[in-house]
Image (cartoon, rainbow, N blue to C red):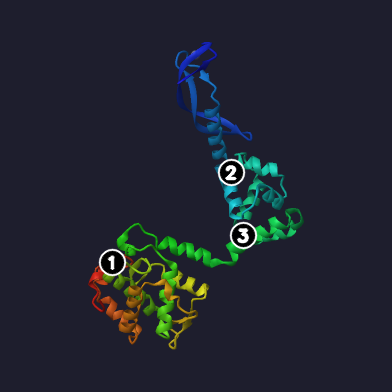
Amino acid sequence: MRAYCHACEADTECRVERRDEVYPVKGEPIAVSAEVMVCDTCGTDLFNAELDNRNLELAFREYRQRKGLLGAEDIIRIRGKYDLSQRSLATLLGWSPATVARYEMGAIPSVPHSEQLSRLDEDMAYVRGLAEAKANQLGQLAKRKLEARLGQLGDRPERLLEAYLIAQHSTSDDMLCGRSEFDLDKAANMISFFARNISGVPKSMLLKLLWYADFLSFGRMQKSISGMVYCHNHYGPIPVAHDSLLEYMQSVGIIDLKPDASGMGEYVEAMVALRDDLFTEEEREVLNDVCARFCRCTARRMKTISHKEDGYIGTQMKEAIPYSYGLTLKAIQ
Ligand SMILES: [Zn+2]
């Protein structure tokens, strides 16, 4: 690489050296591992704007971390979270728009400003309060946009559950999802199907019916219905994150969970009709066969039956059950 050396008064060959340097940030000395350009001929340090910026950024980052201050990426993320423009964020917080812009360019926020932003990030009631207090300055459109976003984030916890379930059931291993991508809609309708067809179905039994349906489908068509990942649990094979799965179904009004007569367990009640256009003919047949085979079973009987399956015997506690076991089901084929 070549650059102009003022000592040699000529364009010369130069190199980049790494060395510990101290940069003052807000009056505090911050040591960073800096990159400096040096003339190969005479050894003089040469100014390079790009390297200098990078070193300063390192020093700023170190300073922010030391003081627990938010950085540019945090501010941009928080703004995105609430769908705010720089101007709307500034209005909410009572800052000038230029201040937000400076922070997003990498300037270090003051301690009170950083604390204000952290609170904005974590406390939606605070955001709602600010939106009310600053309604006039914000303007109708910005206020409505913010309220809509707050609604999405806060009043609809099932969105978070949905994201969690998708994450839990996403796998690149075909044998763990049965060659189908996780389909929450299909899972919901399988649950609705069993709850409608087997009245008062115990929760623990429903979870095993799902397993039989998905694994039987794989046994017959080499493809699961829902794409759910199942694991070996104390009481049998059940979907991963089953509590969140049923909580989600409850929150979107597909089922309701009620305490059973013994008060020890829960049973599942269907709240909405099935959308059976979602399933192929073969899948509907699988669901009907599983229903016919097990509808007269008790939860205890179903537990015993499922414990005899290869997929249960061949896996450890909490281990995911490969769909290949769908080919050797004993209770139904
Ligand atoms: Zn030189």
Residue 78's x, y, as percent?
59, 51
Question: In the picture, which quadrant includes the N terminus?
Answer: top left
Q: Residue at x 57, y 46 (%)?
A: 68
- Left-right relation of 122 to 231: right
How many marks do you count on the picture? 3
**Could you say which quadrant of the image residue 210 lies in?**
bottom left
Residue 116's x, y, as percent?
66, 51
**Could you say which quadrant of the image residue 157 lies in?**
bottom right
**Could you say which quadrant of the image residue 219 lies in?**
bottom left
Disc 2 Cβ-to-ligand 1 distance below 8 Å: no
As measured in the structure, the alpha-carbon distance from the residue carrying label 2 to the one carrying label 1 is: 49 Å
Local packing at callout 1 (Cα closer than 10 Å; few below 14, some 14-19, many 20+) is: some
Element on which disc 1 rests: loop
Question: In the picture, which quadrant includes the C terminus?
Answer: bottom left
Q: Which of 203 and 215 is in front in this view?
A: 215
Disc 1 Cβ-to-ligand 1 distance below 8 Å: no
Foreground tag (3 vs 2): 3
The residue wearing badge 1 is 222
The residue wearing badge 3 is 149
Q: Which residue is drawn at 25% across and 79% down?
A: 331
Element on which disc 2 rests: helix
Amino acid marked by disc 3: Arg
As measured in the structure, the alpha-carbon distance from the residue carrying label 1 to the one carrying label 3 is: 42 Å
As measured in the structure, the alpha-carbon distance from the residue carrying label 3 to the one carrying label 2 is: 22 Å
Q: Residue 72 — which label? A: 2
